[in-house]
Structure formats: structure tokens, C-alpha cells
Amino acid sequence: MSGFMYEVKKIMRCQRGLLHIALVLLPGMVWLALTDSPMDNAMEQYKNEYEWYLEKVNGYCSEASSLYLEQEAERIVEAKQKQSTLLENYYDGKISESEYKKESREIEKVLEHQNGFEVIYQQYLYICENAGNRCFLQTNGWMGLLGKGTLNFILFLGILLLVTPVFCSEYSCQMDTLILTSREGRKSSLYKLLIMIAAVLFLSISISLMEYGFYRFKYGLPNGDYPIQSIRYFAESNKSISLFGAYLSIGLLRLFGGVFLAIFLMFVSVLAKKYALTLLIGAASVILPYIGLSKTGIYRLPLPLPFLLGTDFFAGDIVSSDALTGNEKIVFAQVDTITLFTLLSVSVFLCFSAALWILRCNSNKWQLKSRKRR
């Protein structure tokens, strides 16, 4: 165990691993708070009025809630018409000021929550398109938590800076030669692999829990057992999964994406033996596909990137229409379950193979030969 603790001390203190972890967690929280904005601004702007109606229809759209919303819509439309007529009569001198104020107060009571009603009615129209798997709920928190298929650059940079020096520092001071001649060389490489995997898992889990706490505090995360299709972003998804189940699944995929990236970086560092070259290849393996490929292409490649994104594994087909011609084009073709498990299996195999190759390259060759002779 002393060898393991020595590697922990070397990575976390000498190579500033703890500093890199802190630089991910602290700025990550600040960046999240500064850049976050609700997907539905009206839902937050008229939160009290919206929640007043939401209490009456929360959950699946029943006949009673549908009837209530339709009647409320008619009542508000009639009140607006009366308000317009009342104002015309007052300016024409057909009614006195006292009569105008009295009737205006009655109309204002009807229109008191109209802004919140417009928000809930838009949600009602969306739910009516497929009432079997969509529910009324406050969606801003879940949409922020599940993400919009964007890359967490702070986490990505943190993993890049944390993992790259692990083997590159050995090559820069020619420590690898000494390790190869020692009996514990293979164990040293195994310890490095285990420490990096644990550090990346800690980093990813901390980010995930931090995001959960932030969105739960700011917007609330109610009704986690409702279907994922209750959020517009996942409207066409064919996955039968709840909102909280999707959060856990996406979180696990991102955990694997972080581990995949860490093993890939260590593989490249052992192969290239140069710090700058490893950083360049590691960054290019994520950034170039992210900016250069379509989402459909990204989610079909056995790379760390699709798992780091995670969200669109549960999204449906995304279609855009040309404003001039009206032709529809599929921007993203959804990932079916078989494709997901195939991609995951291939990626796990690549990680396992890369880890074995790293251990072999950092093992004493005479020990390997003696094992073969035995």
C-alpha cells in the first residue's frame, strides 16, 4: 500500500492534482450560476400565476383538467372583450366613471392570472399532442439539469490538465527508465490508472451533484417520476424513462465518458511521451468532432465525446424546416437502444485494451519473458 500512497502523493501534490480538481469545482459552480438562464422565461417571470394554475392540473392531462383549462380560456377571452367594450363606452360617455371603475375591478379579478394562464395553456397544447406520456409540471429545473446536449468545457479542461502529466512527467525527467528496471514498475502503472479513474469519477460525480443541488434550489425539481417526454426537448423520444431516471442514466454515461477520456489521454501520453503533443491530441479528439460533425455523426462514434455530452442519447428525432422552401430536414436522428449498447460495448473494449497496453508498455520486459518461460 505504500507504493499506492506514494503515487497518490506524487499526483495530487507534486503534479498539482488537488489544485486542478479545485479549479474545476469552484469556478464550475460560479460559471453555472452566472451563465444559467431558464429555458422558459415566462414560466419564471409569471411564476406565482403559473403555479396557481399548475396546482389545479398538475400531472397527466385528464378530462377534468382539460375542461377546466378550456373554460378558463373562454372566460379570459370574454373578460378581455368586455374590457375593450367597457373602455369604449366610457370614452363615448355612455357610462359614468364610477360604473367604469366598478366593472373594471370585476374584470381585473378574472384577468388577474392571465399571464400565468398563457404559460400553462401553451404547455397544455403541447401535452395534447401526445397526452399518454406528457405531464404538467415545472420544467425549467429539469431542462437545466438534463442539459441541452452541450459540452461541459470546465470539466473537460479539468480532466485534460489532471491526467496529462501522470505519465508525461515520468518521460520528461526520464523516470520511466528507472521504473522499467524495478520490480514494481507494473504496479506503479496500475496505481496511476486506478488513481486517475478514481479522481475523474470523483470530479464527475461532484459536478453532477453540484448541478442537481443548484437546479433544485433555484427552480425546484418536482415530479421526477414523470415521463421524460414531458419536456419539449425530448418530445419525440421513444425511451420509456422518467425524468429522474434520465438524470441518473445521463450522469452514468458522463461518468463513463470522463473515464474514457482519462484512459485515452494516458494511452496517448504513453505513445507520444510528450506533454504538449498529448494535450493537443486530447483536445483535438473532443473539440474537432464537437465543432465539425453533426450530432448524428457524433453519437455514432466510439469516442469520449458522445458520452461526455450524454443528453441526446435520450432525445428523439430533431427536424428543422427551411423557412423559404418549407422542406423538412432531420438535424438529429435518435439513437436506438441497440445502437447505444453497441457503442457502449465497443468503447468499453477500447478502454480495456488501452489499459492493458499501458500496463504492458510500463512493465519490466525481463519479468514478462520469465513468465512466458514458466
Image (cartoon, rainbow, N blue to C red):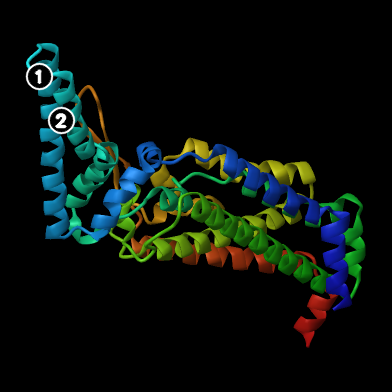
Q: Is residue 63 visible?
A: yes
Across and down, in percent, residue 103 comes to 15, 30
At label 2, counting other C-alpha atoms closer than 10 Å, the crowd grade (few under 14, some 14-19, many 20 or more) is few
Give the amino acid at mark 2: Glu
Give the amino acid at mark 1: Ile
Contact flag, marks 1 and 2 (Cβ < 8 Å): yes
Which residue is at the front of the view, 6 or 218? 218
> Could you tell which of marks 1 and 2 lies nearer the N-terminus?
1
Q: Which residue is mark 1?
A: 95
Across and down, in percent, residue 345 comes to 48, 67
Q: Residue furthest left?
A: 94
Above or below 42: residue 174: below
Q: In terms of image quadrants, where is residue 210?
A: bottom right
Which residue is at the front of the view, 225 or 303? 225
Which residue is at the front of the view, 56 or 177? 56
Placement of the C terminus among the 4 image quadrants: bottom right
- Tell me the residue at 73%/47% (across/down): 23
- Tell me the residue at 55%/57% (across/down): 213
Q: Separation of disc 1 and disc 2 at Cα?
A: 11 Å
Q: Which residue is mark 2?
A: 103
- Tell me the residue at 21%/32% (across/down): 105
Q: Residue furthest top?
A: 92
Across and down, in percent, residue 135 comes to 27, 57
Q: In terms of image quadrants, where is residue 281?
A: top right
Above or below 179: residue 145: above
Residue 207 in the figure: left or right of residue 139: right
Q: In terms of image quadrants, where is residue 327?
A: top left
Q: Secondary structure at mark 2?
A: helix
